[in-house]
Image (tube, rainbow, N blue to C red):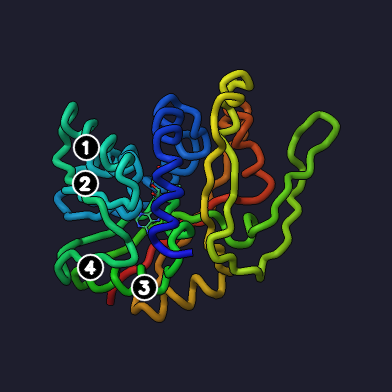
Amino acid sequence: MNANDVAAHWESNAETWTIYSRAGYDKYRDALNTPAFLRMLPPVAGLAGLDLGCGEGTNTRAVARLGARMTGIDIAPTFIRYARETEAQDPLGISYVLGDGQDIDFPTASFDFVTAFMSMMDMADQRQVLRGVHRILKPSGFLQFSILHPCFVPPTRRNVRDANGEAVAVQVADYFDETEGRIERWLFSGIPAEERASLTPFAIPRFHRTLTSWISMIVEAGLAIEAFGEPTASRELALAEPVVADTRVAPIFLHIRSRKA
Ligand SMILES: C[S@@+](CC[C@H](N)C(=O)[O-])C[C@H]1O[C@@H](n2cnc3c(N)ncnc32)[C@H](O)[C@@H]1O
């Protein structure tokens, strides 16, 4: 699958994704994944940052609120339009660029850091993305990204639940199947049934890589891994937001921070 096909899929997802994520239905992102990502992020106040695969910009704005001067890039025009509209209404100094993360054309050594929230497993050629990130980072600059956990969310994953519906185990398969744009179809799980009936599920091209592949690509790009994170819901969070309770059995997300030497 080429970048145009990936862009077309994300463009078709963008309207529903923006409306429902902004309405609070992306529980994994808002309750667990982004807070854990931000806790792991080094201080960024005063630094120039790029958010790769920024979507409608909620996470870009969260990093900007920590004091960074942010640029966001995304391949889907509708996401960029929503992000720019929000920036116009409530300015945080973010500029948004429509573009392909596999073909980053910002000047060499122009950013202190790069973030990528849940976007790099959606890019076909992560090796090229990582090389581009390395080029635009200043010396000692860092990349921090989150992805679906390669070990616990490979192409096939199923929660095993007890009689009360509680997740007690996870069944995984096809770990070594490095998919090239296999389409995954789903909607945010909390969307009420009557609304779901009128929505087209997201169609998400997935480019799964094994953990070994990720580590190899990061190291080959010239980045040194310095931190890992595997967010898990606390007992309190799992009670408050039951949808994220399965992250107490095994992680769904992997966070990696790496640095240019
Ligand atoms: C799962 S969404 C995450 C969006 C946002 N980072 C967030 O956390 O809410 C993945 C994003 O990656 C973007 N994307 C996918 N392939 C891309 C590419 N090659 N270049 C730039 N953005 C890309 C999609 O358009 C989408 O906005």
User: Which one is in front in this view, the residue at disc 4 or the one at disc 1?
Assistant: 1
Q: Position of residue 193 (x, y in %)?
A: 63, 22
Which label number is shown at residue 84? 1
Q: CA distance from mark 4 to mark 1?
A: 24 Å
**To which residue does mark 2 refer?**
96
Residue 246's image quarter? top right
Is 227 on the left or on the right of 139, as rendered? right
Of the residues shown, which amino acid type is indicated by label 2? Answer: Tyr
Comes first in the chain, label 2 or label 3: 2
Q: CA distance from mark 2 to mark 4?
A: 18 Å
Of the residues shown, which amino acid type is indicated by label 3? Answer: Gln
Residue 218's image quarter? bottom left
Comes first in the chain, label 1 or label 2: 1
Tag 1–tag 2 contact (CB < 8 Å): yes
Which label number is shown at residue 128? 3
Comes first in the chain, label 2 or label 4: 2
